[in-house]
Amino acid sequence: MNILVMNCGSSSLKYQLINMETKDVLAKGICERIGIEGSRHVYSAKDKDKRVIEKAMPNHSIAVNMVLETLIDKEVGVINGINDIKAVGHRVLNAGKYYPNSVIVDENVKNAIRDCFDLGPLHNPANLTGIIECEAAMPNIPQIAVFDTAFHQTMPPKAYLYAIPKEYREKYNIRRYGFHGTSHSYVSKRLVKFTGLDINNSKVIVCHLGNGSSISAVMNGKCVDTTMGFTPLEGLMMGTRSGDIDPAVVEFLMNKEGLSVKEVMDILNKKSGVLAMSGISSDFRDVEDAANNGDEDAINTQEAFSYRVAKYIGAYVAAMNGVDAIAFTAGVGENDSAIRGLVCKYLGYLGVVINPEANKVRGKESELTTPDSKVKVCIIPTDEEMAIAEETVALISK
Ligand code: ADP
C-alpha cells in the first residue's frame, strides 16, 4: 500500500511516496518557488539519481500535477499509475477547536480549515490549496488531513487557557494550541515502546529540538501540556524565534524604534533566538564551533538554550508528578551531544545518570542513561512523514 504524504507551504510543496508494507520511501521531492520566477522541482527516487527539473510552476495545481506525472513517468517514476496511490496524507497546521484527530477530508473539514485561516495565516491557506488540488488531480483517492495541533487537543483547560479577558478568548478562539503534534505523538509512542513502558501507566517528556523547538508532557499516551502556544512563537528559544518573552517588549521596541507591530513580530519570529543571542547563526553546528573556540556569546547561547529546556522539563515533571522517560528528537535533539549533555546536567535531582559514551550517538534510537538511572533519557529520531502516513493508513483502514 503506497501513501503519498504532502506538506504544502505558500510557495512550496514537499512530498514523499511511502510503501507502507516495507516502510520504504519510494520517492520524495520538493517543488520550490511556486508562483515565483525560477521555480524548480527537486526529485529523488529510491535507487535512482536525484533530478532537478526547472520548469515554471505558476500555481499549486501545476505543481501537484507535475509531481504526479513524475511519479508515474516511465523512466524516472516509481509507480505505474495514479491508482497505485492508496491515499494522500496532508500536513495541516491548525484545526483550531474542530479536530482532536486526523480526519478524512470532506466539505466540513475543508470549511474548518478555512475557518482557521486566521490562526495559521501562512500555512492553513496553502494546506487547503494542496488538498483541493489533490482532490482535482486524484478524484477517487481519499485525502486525509493530519493536523499539527491535534495531538495537543487533550490538554486540560489549566494548560491551554490564557489569563486574558474571556470576551476576547471566546470571540477569537485565543488559547494555547501547541504545534509539532505529529512529531510529539510519534516520538512519545516510540519512546514508550523503546523503554518497555505500559502506555496506560506512563509519564514521558518529548524534547523536539530543531530549528523550531517544543517540548511536550505526555501522560498515559495523552498530551497534557506543551510549550508552543497560540502560535509557534511561545516556549523555548529557537533557531530564529525568541520563545517566551515579556509582551511589553513589543510596545517598548515599537515606541523606541518607530516600528510597526508586524515589524516587531518579524524580529521575534525571524531575527531572534539562537541567531540573535549568538550573533553567529541560527544553526547549532556553527554556534558549537564558535563555543569550542571560546566565543563567549556562543557559550552563553548554548547555556541559555539548555537552561530553558531544563526549566520546562522541570515544569513538566511537576505537571505529571513524575517522569519515567525523556526523549530528545529533531535536528538538535538527535545530533547535538553538547546540548543534550548541558540539559542533562540539570536533571540530577531526578536521578538521571548519563553515560557519556552513549551520549556521543547521533540520530539513532538509543538510550543515553546508565542502567541504574532512575529516569531513562533516550534519542528517538522523529519521522513526521512516516507519522502522517501511519495516521493516514489507520484512518482509511477503519
Ligand atoms: P526543522 O525545525 O527545520 O525541521 P530540524 O529538526 O531539521 O529543523 O533541525 C535543524 C537544526 O538541527 C539545524 O538548524 C541545526 O541547528 C541542527 N543540527 C542538525 N544537525 C546537527 C548536528 N550534527 N549537530 C548539531 N546540530 C545539528
Image (cartoon, rainbow, N blue to C red):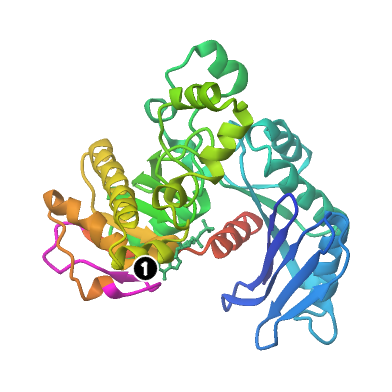
Q: Is residue 151 at all visible to an observer of this figure?
A: yes
* Relative image position of residue 225 (x, y in whole percent): 38, 38
Q: Is residue 380 at all visible to an observer of this figure?
A: no
- Toward the viewer: 154 or 334? 334
* Relative image position of residue 323 (x, y in whole percent): 23, 48
Picture residue at 70% right of the left edge, 87% below the top:
49
- What main secondary structure does the magenta stretch of the protein show? loop
Q: Amino acid at mark 1?
A: Asp
Label 1: which secondary element: helix
Range of residues picked out in magenta:
360-375
Question: Which quadrant does the N terminus fall into?
Answer: bottom right
- Toward the viewer: 362 or 64? 362
For residue 201, above or below residue 16: above
Question: Which quadrant does the C terminus fall into?
Answer: bottom right
Residue 347 located left or right of residue 182: left
Q: Is mark 1 within 8 Å of ligand 1?
A: no
* Relative image position of residue 54 (x, y in whole percent): 83, 72
Picture residue at 48% right of the left edge, 23% below the top:
252
Residue that carries the numbered disc 1 in the rendered image: 289
